[in-house]
Image: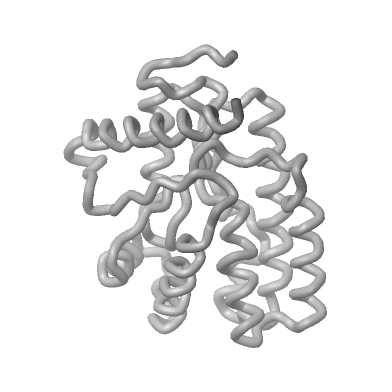
Amino acid sequence: MSKLIQYGIPNDAVITVAGMVGAGKSTFTNALAEKLKFRTSMEKVDNNPYLENFYHDFKRWSFHLQIFFLAERFKEQKRMFDYGGGFVQDRSIYEDTGIFARMHFDKGNMSNVDYETYTHLFEAMVMTPYFPQPDCLIYLEGSLDDILARIQKRGRKMEQETPVSYWEEMYDRYEKWIASFNSCPVLRVNINDYDLRDNPESIDHIVEKIAQKIEAKREVRL
């Protein structure tokens, strides 16, 4: 039986933070990990060799981008569980197929052959009983206006040059995706319900809810 740490969360737990671009996943991931004394698993964006080209030519680079993310996230998921857990993860592997790959296929940015190849690879890697699922997925949500304001505020040039219609489409897809997601317990958290910069303790009530979700999941296992 796992030793429990403060707040009633097992020290072998893996907690994944999901949400729309601009929702503040990285900031939340770092704050939660610091609170729990967990390690972080951050999304690898800057080392993606396709990312900048992708934002200038979706159709040419969508497949390459998604394959890179899928491979990196699969390796990272395995690494966290092989290590023995105790991680907070920035972005989930499920968003790759449920949001981004499907979005680019529907918009004609990924061919039928490429999308089928990607989907078959995802199913072979992830949709098996042997793939370790997170103990809890935290979904950071907010209004579209709030999300767009955060994207503008952080000032990434390639994101600011992206048409607003792209972000609107992604926002709608996220809302539909999370409504049907059932691979692990989900805790929905509004981005206006905490303020990690001016009130770090505002994460405390979220930690309590995470503990409840994980406890309920592990009781089901027993």
- Tell me which residue sits at (52%, 50%) in the image: 91
- Tell me which residue sits at (35%, 58%) in the image: 141
Q: Specify the quadrant of the image occupied by residue 153.
A: bottom left
- Tell me which residue sits at (64%, 23%) in the image: 84
Q: Is residue 63 above or below residue 37?
A: below
- What kind of colouring is applied to the model shown? one colour
**Residue 182 percent coordinates (x, y):** 55, 53
**Residue 132 percent coordinates (x, y):** 68, 38
**Residue 61 percent coordinates (x, y):** 68, 75
Q: What is the quadrant of the N terminus in the image?
A: top right
Q: Is residue 46 left or right of residue 64?
A: left
Q: What is the quadrant of the C terminus in the image?
A: top right
Q: Specify the quadrant of the image occupied by residue 157.
A: bottom left
Q: Is residue 49 left or right of residue 175?
A: right
What residue occupies the far left of the structure in this picture? 198
- Tell me which residue sits at (73%, 51%) in the image: 126
Q: Is residue 201 above or below residue 58?
A: above
Q: Nearer the viewer, residue 120 or 214?
A: 214
**Residue 155 percent coordinates (x, y):** 35, 64
Q: How many marks?
A: 0
Q: Is residue 159 left or right of residue 75?
A: left
